[in-house]
Amino acid sequence: MPELKESPLRFRGYAEPDMAQRAAEFRELMSRRRTVRHFSDRPVPRRLIEDCVMTAASAPSGANQQPWTFVCISDPAMKTRIRVAAEEEEREFYSGRASQEWLDALGPLGTDPDKPFLETAPWLIAIFAQRYGLGPDGGKIKHYYVPESVGIATGLLISSLHNAGLASLTHTPSPMGFLNAICDRPDREKAIILLVAGYPAEDAKVPDIRRKGADEIIVWRE
Ligand code: IYR
């Protein structure tokens, strides 16, 4: 067994009234997060995106393998290539690949195959899951709980962007293989989500949806 190396936990505790206030305030902040489909072309500094992505990368991961790659794209030519490829897949999806049941479920969201936001929004973040890693000698390193790890990191990224005052959209054109080619990522990486990030358009509207209440999603056993 290798020797276990430990360091101090940089835990910060709060008085209980402060904890209650912090929890309530964070809940309120996050309750305002909405998936946005109408973006402004107003630029967003790269530093802001980097901070949010590095927060995402603080996520727990299986055996701390950190099995993710974030390709952050503001290059207009690359965004155009992504839009063209995504819309090609989406046209197939909406005109036959998706079941009627699936299309009916999407009805209230008003989505369609046109994805202008892929060019309008200042940043696209292609999130790749690494099926396995590579050691210094080029050997395969097994990764564990990859979808769970990348899912948690993506949640942190969406929360960080919202906290910074940016809107996002979890876009999932399917299949997403074209992103490997455009982003120049190896086959051992699988695109999971194309996150669109930026400011909402001034007139942005969102579907009138409701979130489930505590009594619908929490089961208490006290
Ligand atoms: N990928 C398609 C369809 C789509 C699927 C689900 I599930 C959504 O929640 C939203 C859209 C699209 O992006 O339009």
Image: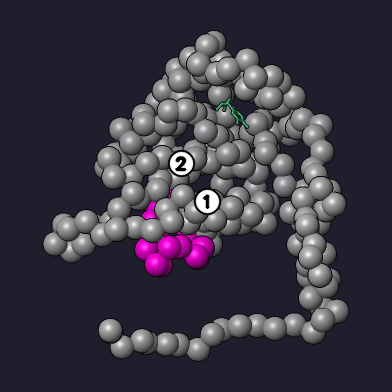
Q: To which residue does mark 1 refer? A: 151
Compared to residue 196, the image places residue 138 above or below, namely below
Q: Is residue 104 magenta?
A: no
Quick one: 117 or 47, which is closer to the camera?
Answer: 117
Badge 2, how many Cα within 10 Å: few under 14, some, many 20+?
A: many
Residue at 80% in and 34% down: 209
Please state which amino acid type lies under the numbered disc 2.
Ile
| Label 2: element kind | strand
Residue at 75% in and 32% down: 206
Note whether ligand 1 is within 8 Å of mark 1: no
Residue at 39% in and 67% down: 63
Residue lying furthest top: 95
Q: In which quarter of the image is residue 171?
A: top right
Q: Give yes or no for contact between labels 2 and 1 (Cβ–Cβ under 8 Å).
A: yes
Quadrant containing ligand 1 reads: top right
Task: Locate residue 138 relative to residue 219 in the image: left or right.
Answer: left
| Percent of width and height locating residue 178 | 36, 29
Quick one: 46 or 173, which is closer to the camera?
Answer: 173
| Percent of width and height locating residue 32 | 77, 48
Range of residues picked out in magenta? 57-70
- For the residues marked 2 and 1, what is the alpha-carbon distance in whole angstroms? 9 Å
Which sits earlier in the primary sequence, circle 2 or circle 1?
A: 1
Compared to residue 100, the image places residue 41 above or below, namely below
Task: Locate residue 165 relative to residue 197 in the image: left or right.
Answer: right
Quadrant in which the N terminus is drawn:
bottom left
| Label 1: element kind | helix
Q: Is residue 59 magenta?
A: yes
On residue 192, which mark appears?
A: 2
Residue at 18% in and 63% down: 136
| Percent of width and height locating residue 87 | 49, 20
Quadrant in which the C terminus is drawn:
bottom right
Compared to residue 153, the image places residue 206 above or below, namely above
